[in-house]
């Protein structure tokens, strides 16, 4: 089987070239062709001699995800259903907002954590994505929309910190000036709060932002709705979050507000009590309903009241605008199950 050059970091690309007697700088050239110029084979690499291109194509291959479908929402968001080389489906979402062009990427096919309110949690877990597959989600969207991606959120299918090595390797490519050149300051990893994974991030040289999907300030309710809480108690999550905020970047706590579950003022009060003393922001996310899940979004009045209560605290509070709901591209709606029923297929 031929060696897939997309699976290499810049260092191992240079080493691979060197090992077959080619100058290491050729590795940089190929890396740019792959990630910046969307090369899918060696024939387009015109700054490399024909002879060398022929030799490279006899030894190496360049893999790519394929677009199955694209569906566009009225607000301009686009959901991409993508095929992996082993014929599995993943989803990634493009979210434009003025100059900011964000891609929400998946890190796993399915998710083993099965949070009760999440559509991805309904899927069987198939496998972790490789670093190059994660980066390819962004590259293929950038190629398709013909516009530079400025922001990445690791908030698609899967829990990024369960696949932390590949996620960290992917970030090394996305932030590289000869890769996708997207700043780490514009990169957010969103986790349910896996303390061991956060610890690994804390010790790493990465400077990405961290968001913790907290959602239920009542520990018993959180255990029920997010079973991983059994192994990652709130107390430990908050402790490591504080450390991250103090040593790296200010952590954002995401709060998906769900009708009759966590939308009372009592819950807001509890949330603020928990976060006392932790430099942090709160991102309030009205729940996006999903056809086969029983949960509902609270009324606008209730959301406003909850939001207003939080605004009286010292935290920065943002109320997330729902994007791409009608094409099931919103937060917690990615499942590749009922992939692209609504919206306009623009592929
Ligand atoms: S919320 Fe995140 S961790 Fe929980 S099931 Fe969904 S994708 Fe997995």
Image (cartoon, rainbow, N blue to C red):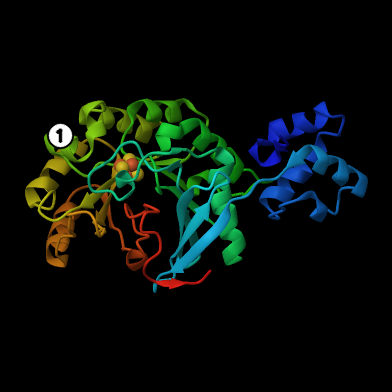
Q: Is residue 248 visible?
A: no
Residue at 49% x, 65% y is 70
Dot 1 crowding, Cα within 10 Å, few <14, some 14–19, many 20+: some
Residue 136 placement, left or right of 88: right
Front residue (pair 11, 325)? 325
Residue 84: % across, % down: 54, 48
Residue at the spot of label 1: 219
Residue at 41% x, 49% y is 156
Residue 262 placement, left or right of 214: left
Front residue (pair 334, 177)? 334
Residue 148 placement, left or right of 37: left
In the rendered view, tell whether residue 319 sits above or below residue 18: below
Is the N terminus in the top left, top right, bottom left or bottom right quadrant? top right
Front residue (pair 34, 268)? 34
Residue 181 placement, left or right of 52: left
Q: Is residue 98 visible?
A: yes
In the rendered view, tell whether residue 105 sits above or below residue 201: below
Q: How many marks?
A: 1
Residue at 49% x, 53% y is 151
In the rendered view, tell whether residue 151 sits above or below residue 188: below
Residue 309: % across, % down: 13, 54
């Amino acid at each position: 089987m031929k060696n897939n050059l997309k699976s290499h970091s810049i260092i191992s690309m240079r080493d691979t070239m060197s090992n077959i007697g080619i100058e290491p700088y050729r590795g940089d050239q190929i890396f740019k062709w792959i990630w910046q110029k969307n090369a899918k084979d060696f024939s387009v690499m015109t700054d490399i001699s024909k002879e060398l291109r022929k030799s490279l194509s006899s030894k190496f291959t360049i893999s790519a995800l394929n677009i199955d479908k694209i569906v566009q929402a009225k607000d301009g968001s686009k959901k991409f259903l993508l095929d992996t080389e082993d014929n599995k489906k993943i989803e990634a979402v493009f979210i434009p907002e003025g100059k900011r062009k964000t891609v929400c990427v998946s890190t796993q096919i399915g998710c083993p954590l099965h949070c009760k309110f999440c559509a991805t949690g309904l899927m069987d877990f198939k496998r972790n994505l490789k670093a190059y597959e994660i980066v390819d989600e962004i590259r293929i969207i950038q190629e398709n929309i013909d516009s530079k991606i400025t922001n990445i959120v690791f908030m698609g299918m899967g829990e990024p910190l369960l696949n932390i090595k590949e996620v960290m390797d992917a970030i090394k490519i996305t932030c590289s000036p000869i890769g996708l050149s997207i700043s780490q300051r514009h990169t957010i990893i969103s986790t349910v709060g896996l303390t061991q994974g956060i610890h690994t991030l804390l010790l790493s040289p990465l400077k990405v932002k961290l968001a913790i999907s907290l959602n239920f300030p009542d520990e018993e309710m959180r255990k029920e709705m997010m079973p991983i809480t059994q192994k990652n108690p709130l107390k430990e999550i908050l402790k490591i979050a504080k450390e991250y905020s103090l040593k790296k970047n200010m952590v954002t706590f995401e709060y998906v507000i769900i009708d009759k579950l966590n939308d009372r003022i009592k819950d807001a009060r509890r949330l603020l009590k928990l976060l006392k003393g932790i430099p942090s922001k709160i991102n309030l996310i009205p729940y996006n309903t999903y056809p086969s899940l029983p949960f509902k979004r609270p009324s606008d009045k209730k959301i406003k009241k909850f939001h207003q209560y939080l605004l009286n605290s010292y935290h920065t509070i943002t109320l997330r605008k729902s994007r791409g709901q009608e094409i099931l591209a919103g937060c917690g709606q990615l499942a590749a199950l009922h992939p692209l029923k609504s919206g306009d297929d623009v592929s």
